[in-house]
Amino acid sequence: HASPIVAPAYPAPPWALPGARILKVAFETAIDPVLDMLPPRLTRSAPPYAVITVAQYPESPVGPFSLATQCIGCRAGFFIRAYALQAVVDNPAALSGLREVWGVPAKLGQVSLTADANAVSARVSCDGNVVVEVALAEAEPIDADSLRLDPVLNLRITPSLQKGKPHESVQLVQIDPEYAIREPVRGRGSVRYPESSDADPWHMLPVLNVISAVFCTADTEMPLARFVMPY
């Protein structure tokens, strides 16, 4: 479950994550970056859309951490999925586990999430730049069944140890946690890219139209992969 396996920097999965707070904003985006970035086994949605999820985990086997992920909405066969394009996490031990076990394309940075009865906001920074700000305003309660958190597909790559040789393995890993959702709300969403750069190109998926914004608390986990398939 770790690299190197003789001295893991984190516990084996699954990781229990009780009391999570999760903000998800979906928006229509441009077709060209979606076609450029999706793996060949996946197909785009129509219209193309993207999802930014910011999750705050107050308890985990590696301590508290927050994770922000930018995904492309897509399909694997007939099934709706979210392909993770980039992510930021604020805990070094979580960073190691998320990358090595689950293939999360994460970098170390700062992730903040604040919520009250009427609004939720999040800010994500990396290398001193604020790469994205997302928010939900005018919150109103909804049924838990109305809030959907799609399975996420990550690209898990094992690099070669020899110069000029191809990667040892390139896999798509599907992460499909269970959620016990509490206090779900929806509202008017917004997404803004204040300082994205070539090193952190969150802006490559422009915001053409915000589709939905939801927020909840939940007990969940980082489970073992549901599926692992060749790229």
Image (tube, rainbow, N blue to C red):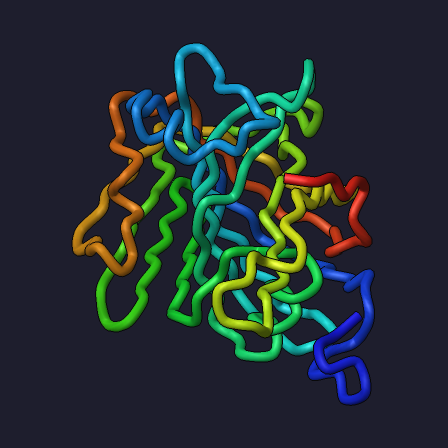
- Can residue 171 be seen by looking at this rendering? yes
Residue 92 percent location from the top left of the image: 53, 79
- Can residue 180 be seen by looking at this rendering? no
**How many discs mark residues in the rendered view?**
0
Q: Residue furthest bottom?
A: 7
Horizontal side of residue 57 vs 84, given as left or right: right
Above or below 76: residue 39: below
Horizontal side of residue 22 vs 34, given as left or right: right
Quadrant location of the N terminus in the rendered image: bottom right
Query: Which residue is found at the position 56% from the left and 34% from the top?
Result: 82
Considering depth in this image, is 32 or 141 the residue closer to the camera? 32
Residue 213 percent location from the top left of the image: 44, 31
- Image quadrant in which you'd find residue 147: top right
Horizontal side of residue 117 vs 182, given as left or right: left
Query: Which residue is found at the position 81% from the left and 42% from the top?
Result: 226
- Image quadrant in which you'd find residue 210: top left
Residue 25 percent location from the top left of the image: 43, 35
Query: Which residue is found at the position 81% from the left and 87% from the top?
Result: 6
Considering depth in this image, is 208 or 3 the residue closer to the camera? 3
Residue 66 percent location from the top left of the image: 52, 63
Q: Residue furthest top?
A: 46
Query: Which residue is found at the position 43% from the left and 71% from the top?
Result: 108
Considering depth in this image, is 151 or 103 the residue closer to the camera? 103
Horizontal side of residue 25 vs 175, given as left or right: left
Above or below 127: residue 22: above
Quadrant location of the C terminus in the rendered image: top right
